[in-house]
Image (cartoon, grey):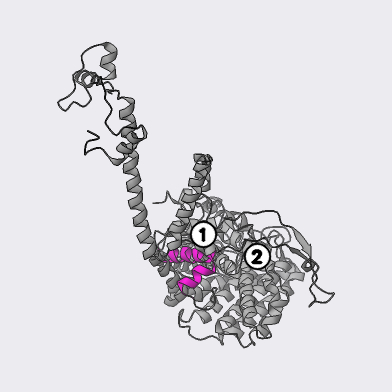
Amino acid sequence: MEGSPSDSAAVLALRETFGDRKPPDITRKITACVACRKQKIKCHMGANGQPPCTRCKKRGLSCTVNKSLQMILESDASWKHIVDRKIRILEAALGKVANHLSLPDLIDEAIDQDDEINEDVEQGAMPTPSVRAGTAHISPTAERHTPLNFEVVMDPDSGPAAIPGSVVSPIAIPGMETNRADQDIITRGVISLEAAQRYLDIYQNRLDHFLYRIIGDRRDMAEVRSASPLLLAAICAVGALHLATSDFEKCYQEFASIAASQTFSRRNTVDDIRGLCVAAFWLSGISWTCVGAAVRIATEIQLHRSIFQALRGDRTHYQRTRLYYLVFVCDHHFSVAYGRPPMTRRDDAIRACMQFLETENAVEDDQRLISQVQFWSVGSDIYETFGIDVERPLDSSMIEPLRRFSISLDSIRNEWTRRFRLNEYVGDYPRKGVGLHYHFAKLYLFSMAFRGIGKPGFKAADVALDIDESANTAVLSATAILRAVNDDEEIQGFLNGLPSYFDLMIAFAVVFVLKVATKYAASVRVDTSEIRSLVEELVVVLKRITSNMHPRHLLVSVAKGAENLLERCCPQEVTGPVPSNAHVTMNEPNFDQNLFDMSVDDWNGTSFNNFFMHEFDFLTNQGQMNGYQPDMNWTGMQQMP
């Protein structure tokens, strides 16, 4: 008999290799287990003849019966045959899934990799498990970075006054222009196509209009995917954050992985810059990192030089120029307010921003964008003029610039408020946003009045009245911010969508008024009970708004922190209004120092020693604020309730 019907094809094939399809003639069948044979005693197996035997079961011993070599080989061949069949079934199922998702390349690439492995096996060069495990974690968009060779070139169309660096150019490497879109967040299976479409919809129909359409003209999913995997990952991360879905963590990590892999890329595009800007505006934990990369790439691909062709009506250069303006605004969002020098300067493109609006391609969103360019140009001038030494009191030489900047901010607000009308996607935000940015800038400017408070030379006689006026203006701007959030339901609806800079400024306004109403209550004419009422109402509003937000949203932490600070700063016994004749004094008033030891240890487990309760100026808080990255520290965040 050549083989029983139960013998598998793999077993029969194995026997064939030995030249005989018959089962082996085993002259002596082993029935005793190893333990019993060692003791040379009779082994009593169970009713079905399978281990464990009676003795091993009673003594709790390991009961095994040795098999012949032939039986071991046949068992191994049978197991491999079953596994091979299951893998083929899995491949067929994945092929159907890939076809359903219109991703035929997914299977093709797997087949190509399988062919490479087979070739390695045939050549005796099978990669070790450690090597394969290492390559499995390489980002899909990572590219090999090899040293470049350069050549000297002479452009016949340019004159002798060319940019010096333009005469040395890297030599192109064949094969560098591969399509990175083949490995985006959808292709890699991080999220489904349907989920990505939801995130693109919320971004394109709402979020993008708060920032003057970063991605430019409307695009469908196929266009976004082909444009940049980095842009798609950023949109998905921001969309998931604002829809409060569980995909946020995955999308965030995928974006960070792609961005890191492209750090040294020589193939970055304008759409990669868009992706970095999207992430910077909304993903607070990595904003500064993304801004730095965006500025570097923007200058590398010469966005700042497109203004000249844009003014001549070239649409491609128009889009490049407005992207440069977005990079400028993004840079200033996360530099000036954090005490960092801006990386972008007032160059030809910035100086020509009003001319840009006169081009045939300009639309209303460009007007909103240019209003921001003007606000932040003044903000940059404020930073350059007053510097970062917050211990130095203002002197008479600084009063005139203070007034000049205030007038500039007033002019910008008056100019742009009257221009804007209701927006199809974000309602009256264009006009109300100008008001909020105006008060943010005013608060930043006039908080300078408190520099050096309590230090020798603070509020010298020749500037005392000016400092009083500036201090009160700062309080008015801070309370205007709080009232706007408390009283305007439309603004409340904007908060789950506005960039994180707004969350920062709301937090700063809260801290500012609490310090003025408590520690420095004798320095400014302020009704402390009104301040407490404003902050109490703000806490209620923020808790209601953030109740449905993703826990990683910065405003969630701001709401918790504001509530904690209110409880510590303003106990229930609140004193009445400060007399109207109160004024800034040369020395700090007496107060209970323990009340102002405001280490907010319960902000998501992050220590905020003196984070908010230091001097009013933004710059003093830079170190602590840089350490506060609520959506960056995933190890700690994953332990949140």
Label 2 or label 1, whichever comes before in sequence order: 1
Three-letter amino acid code at disc 1? Phe
Foreground residue among 378 and 448: 378
* Residues at discs 2 and 1 in contact (Cβ within 8 Å): no
Q: Quadrant of the N terminus?
A: top left
Query: Label 2: few (<14), some or many (≥20) within 10 Å?
Result: many
Foreground residue among 98 and 378: 98
Q: Report the magenta residues as a range.
A: 218-244
Quadrant location of residue 370? bottom right
Expressed as whole percent of the image width and height from the top left, the position of residue 611 reads: 56, 55
Q: Is residue 620 left or right of residue 190?
A: right
Which residue: 56% across, 59% down?
259
Expressed as whole percent of the image width and height from the top left, the position of residue 564 reads: 46, 56
The question of residue 385 being in magenta is answered with no
Please say whether residue 471 is visible from this viewpoint: no
Foreground residue among 572 and 450: 450
Foreground residue among 121 and 304: 121
Expressed as whole percent of the image width and height from the top left, the position of residue 221 reads: 46, 71
Check the image and report above or below for 63 versus 155: above
Query: Label 1: few (<14), some or many (≥20) within 10 Å?
Result: many
Expressed as whole percent of the image width and height from the top left, the position of residue 242 reads: 43, 66
Quadrant location of residue 496? bottom left
Taken as a whole, is the magenta stretch helix, strand or loop? Answer: helix
Residue placed under numbered mark 1 in the picture: 255
Q: Circle 1 — which element?
A: helix
Please say whether residue 558 is visible from this viewpoint: yes
Label 2 – label 1 distance at C-alpha = 17 Å
Which numbered dot is residue 297? 2
Q: Circle 2 — which element?
A: helix
